[in-house]
Amino acid sequence: MLIVDSQVHIWGADTPKRPWPVPAHGRPVVHRERPITAQTLLADMKEAGVDRAIVVPPSWEGDRNDLVAQAVADHPDSFRYVARYSLADPTLPQWIGNWQDNPGMLALQLTFQTPLFQKPLIEGTIEWLWAAAERAGLPLTIYAPNALMPLLDQVAREHPALSIVINHFGLTGTRRDDEAFSDFDNLLALSVRPNVALKASCLPFYSTQAYPFPNLHRHIRSAFDAFGPRRLFWGTDLSRLTCSYREGVTLFTEQLPWLQGEDRDWVMGRGICEWLGWDRRGP
């Protein structure tokens, strides 16, 4: 079985040579003091039994893709990446049109988890982006709260050729356990859009229980029943994982008795590779 982590952040230290930006609204919270690098991630993957990972630049580093692109160039059998790009950058439309010039890149990450970041989505000022990404065949991975899923449902309906992956079950903020899933039905409703898929990533972070996080199981099953095995992608968001990396794997491979056989193969790696075109987008 091929095991592919659908989202892991890698980053570098905040140094004078490569400083992190300090936005006017304040720097996002760093998940870990010690950076996860490509090399440390490879060692962690080997220990956990993970074959491949999709690496994503974290928000606290700003909109830069140098480290993730280099990780793919250095380790093409192990990594592909999702890029970040500022919505305010006037070169973004041109970049979207030429996105396939970036070897090893699979998608563009959009982040709407805070009120400030949500304004373009709520105010409808990025309709041009949905249309441009659809024309260019650029998949989008989107981090947004489940309260805003009706807006993304409209996007998916109006742009049926636009490939969308929702991060982290749409879970954001500080709520945990059942409270975190209070508007989960908004996400499940998106399953009627065949161009929308879902990352089952970062889930242990939203449970106060210990491994194997029994209060998460019914929500995972609900997502599986709604989206099916080919549109539900296992992942960890490793820097926020509250158990070992290996336990992040076995939560799905050993603790969900209903997830077996070919369905498990799709969820654990085959699905994300086919949806984002891993083998088509090599360095």
Image (spheres, rainbow, N blue to C red):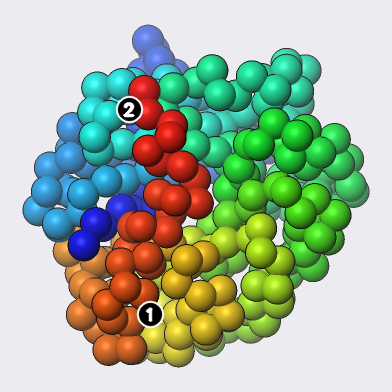
Element carrying mark 2 = helix
- Residue 31, given in percent of the width and then of the height, sits at 39, 48
- Residue 71, given in percent of the width and then of the height, sits at 30, 27
Label 1 or label 2, whichever comes before in sequence order: 2
Amino acid type at circle 1 is Thr
C-alpha separation, residue under disc 1 versus residue under disc 2: 35 Å
- Whether residue 258 appears in this view of the structure is yes
Task: Specify the farthest residue to the top.
Answer: 17
Residue in the picture at 24% in, 66% down: 249
- Quarter of the image for residue 281 reads top left
Q: Is residue 3 left or right of residue 129?
A: left
Residue beneath disc 1 = 208
Question: Does 181 appear above or below 161?
Answer: below
Q: Is residue 61 left or right of residue 150?
A: left
Residue in the picture at 85% in, 54% down: 158
Question: Does 103 appear above or below 150?
Answer: above
| Number of the front mark, 1 or 2 | 2
Residue beneath disc 2 = 72
Question: Does 67 appear above or below 41?
Answer: above
Residue in the picture at 17% in, 64% down: 246
- Residue 226, given in percent of the width and then of the height, sits at 58, 80
Image quarter in which the C terminus is found: top left
Question: Does 37 appear above or below 215?
Answer: above
- Quarter of the image for residue 41 reads top left
**Label 2 packing within 10 angstroms: few (<14), some (14-19), many (20+):** many
- Residue 54, given in percent of the width and then of the height, sits at 38, 43
- Quarter of the image for residue 56 reads top left
* Residue closest to the eye, 171 or 188: 188
Residue in the picture at 31% in, 73% down: 262
The mark total stands at 2
- Whether residue 32 appears in this view of the structure is no
